[in-house]
Image (cartoon, rainbow, N blue to C red):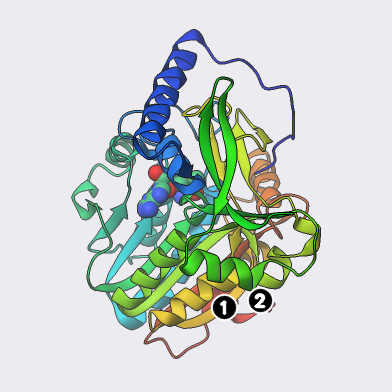
Amino acid sequence: MPLSADPILPPPSPDAAAHSGRLAEHIAETIAAESDWIPFSRYMELALYAPGLGYYTAGARKFGVEGDFITAPEISPMFARCFALQAVQVTDVVGGDILELGPGSGVFAADLYSELKALGKAPQRYLLLEVSPDLRERQRELLAKRLPDDIARFEWIDALPDRIRGFVIGNEVLDVVPFDIVHRDREGVRERGVIVTEAGFAWDDQPLPEGELKRRAAAVIPPGDYDYLTEINLAAEALVRTLASSMEAGLAIFIDYGFAEHEYYHAQRSMGTMRCHYRHRFHGDPFFMPGLQDITAHIDFTAMSRAAEQGGAEVLGYTTQAYFLISCGLAVLVSSGDPTATLSKLKATSAVHRLISPSEMGELFKVLGFGKGIDQPILGFQSARHLPL
Ligand SMILES: C[S@@+](CC[C@H](N)C(=O)[O-])C[C@H]1O[C@@H](n2cnc3c(N)ncnc32)[C@H](O)[C@@H]1O
């Protein structure tokens, strides 16, 4: 996801600005109704997912060149083709379905399914868990266009199934699950929330109530008396834990930008990792044009792996995106095909370079795998460097 950190953000169209105004009003009303203060996770939930208004739930174009960011499946179909090989290894052993969390534009599902079909391994069911009604419609349109004879095999679901068997995948999903922010300053460690002032939304820190967030903040914030601010994503952990406990047999893979706990909660990262994405620029102001920009934070992969284990799954690997794709056979996929198609091959190679280059997505993006009932080395982690968790 190559982006520029540009403080000068292009102005939205009048329609888009009006839409953002309606969402801001809705958030302000919610804050007034909820004791004039809401935790940041509540603000993020409204900004991204308020029905009909949020960034993901309204109709803004998000993915690709005309949107706000580009994800790996949008860069190259090779990404999904690698995961198809991984899926085959798993479903050959345990059977079952493909389950994709947060399918975005639907392009990954289309590419993954097409590759599985080409390998003679098309799944009976491809489940798509998508919280956005607008994106569901776009996914359905794309899949009906690309795979008209197979569309009946795609099934949209509202919540995780009670029992999961097969291959589960979520690319850049955990980073958009609403997270909390904790802040240490001279007053101690408090929770960051949002209030309404005459100038608009503003930060406000409140004492942390007794509970998991307070316990976690005490455990992860490095000792010291300097200002320190960080995100903690208990909701993403709950999603991983529920998925792991519902899994009968199979492999779940999550890809996202992030680090293990010892790097994440480092003294040098004292300003947190929140990033807002707007028209291929990133910045740190979640109050800018709510509804027109994505809000994300890096993933604490140690916390996610612990959640998977709490759900009874075994962590089967943790490595960089580059290592994982290469371990799945990316180089072979790139060099196969028509040797005379030089131009298309060059284009494909340059896209693949973006997926694996350390200066682009290759190292910042990590792959975490956990599962049950698989006793052979997982293809993508087989020859990959295992990172400490
Ligand atoms: C940044 S996009 C990534 C889309 C796609 N996976 C890709 O790589 O292009 C995040 C996606 O996750 C969806 N999403 C957010 N929260 C979710 C949740 N709790 N369960 C399932 N999908 C979710 C969003 O609506 C969107 O489709």
Q: Residues within 10 Å of mark 1 (few under 14, many from 20)?
A: many
In the picture, the disc for residue 317 is: 1
In terms of depth relative to the viewer, which is nearer, 325 or 114? 325
Q: Give, as a three-letter code, the residue at label 1.
A: Gly
* Vertical relation: 366 (above or below) 387: above
Query: What secondary structure is found at the residue carrying circle 2?
Result: loop
Residue projecting furthest to the front: 187
Task: Name the residue beneath numbered marker 2.
Answer: 384
Q: x, y percentage for residue 372?
A: 38, 84
In this rendering, does residue 67 appear at all?
yes
Left or right for 224, reference 370: right
Query: What secondary structure is found at the residue carrying circle 1?
Result: strand
Instruction: Pick the quarter of the image with the C terminus.
Output: bottom right
The structure residue drawn at horizontal position 42% and vertical position 28%, both measured from the top left corner, is 28
Q: x, y percentage for residue 204?
A: 58, 41
Nearest-to-viewer mark from 2 and 1: 1
Quadrant in the rendering for residue 346:
top right
The structure residue drawn at horizontal position 58% and vertical position 27%, both measured from the top left corner, is 288
Instruction: Pick the quarter of the image with the N terminus.
Output: top right
The structure residue drawn at horizontal position 52% and vertical position 11%, both measured from the top left corner, is 13
Residue projecting furthest to the left: 152
In terms of depth relative to the viewer, which is nearer, 253 or 183? 183
